[in-house]
Image (spheres, rainbow, N blue to C red):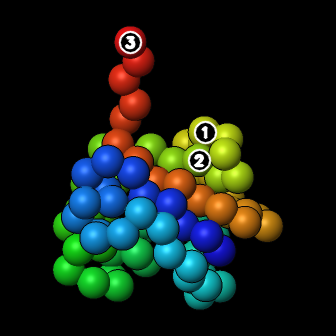
C-alpha cells in the first residue's frame, strides 16, 4: 500500500511517501494510524493525536472508521483549510 503524508505529518515522519504492507489486523484507517504509530518515533509523534488527522483512500476523503478494503493509496494529513 502506498502511504502519503502531508504538512506536519510529513515533517514529523521525515518523508512524504512510503510503501508499507500493514498486517491483516489493520482493517480501517484508525487501525492503520495506530499501527503506523508503532513504526518509529517520528511516526509515533505524527500519529499521537488521531483526532487531529484526516485521511483519503485512493484520493477520496474518508472518515477514520472507513475500511481499507483494496486501497492502493492512503493519504494522512492535518485538517485542510480553504481560502
- The alpha-carbon separation of the residues under discs 2 and 1 comes to 4 Å
**Quarter holding residue 79:** top left
Task: Report the side of 73 relative to 81 (left or right).
Answer: right
Q: Which mark is residue 44?
A: none
> Residue 61 got which mark?
1
Residue ID at (65%, 52%) = 57
Q: State the residue position of label 2.
A: 56
Decide: marks 2, 1 in contact (CB < 8 A)?
Answer: yes
Residue 12 vertical position relative to residue 25 in the rendered view, above or below: above
Q: Secondary structure at mark 3?
A: loop
Residue at point 40%, 31% (across, down): 80
Give the quarter of the image for residue 33: bottom left
From what the image shows, is residue 82 above or below residue 29?
Answer: above
Q: Percent from the top left, x then y, of residue 52?
A: 30, 44
Mark 2 or mark 3: which is in front? 3
Nearer-N-terminus badge (3/1): 1
Which residue position is annotated with label 3?
A: 83
Image coordinates of residue 20 in percent, x first then y, are: 56, 82
Q: Where's residue 65, x and y in %?
A: 56, 52
Q: Is residue 76 above or below residue 63?
A: below
Residue nearer the viewer, 36 or 64: 36
Choose top left, top right, bottom left or bottom right for residue 45: bottom left
Q: Quadrant of the N terminus?
A: bottom right
Q: CA distance from mark 2 to mark 3?
A: 20 Å
Q: Residue furthest top?
A: 83
Amino acid at each position: 500500500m502506498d502511504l502519503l503524508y502531508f504538512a506536519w505529518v510529513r515533517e514529523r515522519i521525515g518523508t512524504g511517501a512510503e510503501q508499507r504492507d500493514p498486517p491483516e489486523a489493520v482493517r480501517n484507517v484508525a487501525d492503520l494510524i495506530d499501527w503506523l504509530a508503532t513504526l518509529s518515533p517520528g511516526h509515533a509523534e505524527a500519529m499521537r493525536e488521531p483526532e487531529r488527522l484526516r485521511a483519503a483512500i485512493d484520493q477520496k476523503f474518508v472518515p477514520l472508521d472507513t475500511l481499507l478494503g483494496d486501497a492502493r493509496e492512503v493519504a494522512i494529513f492535518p485538517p485542510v483549510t480553504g481560502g
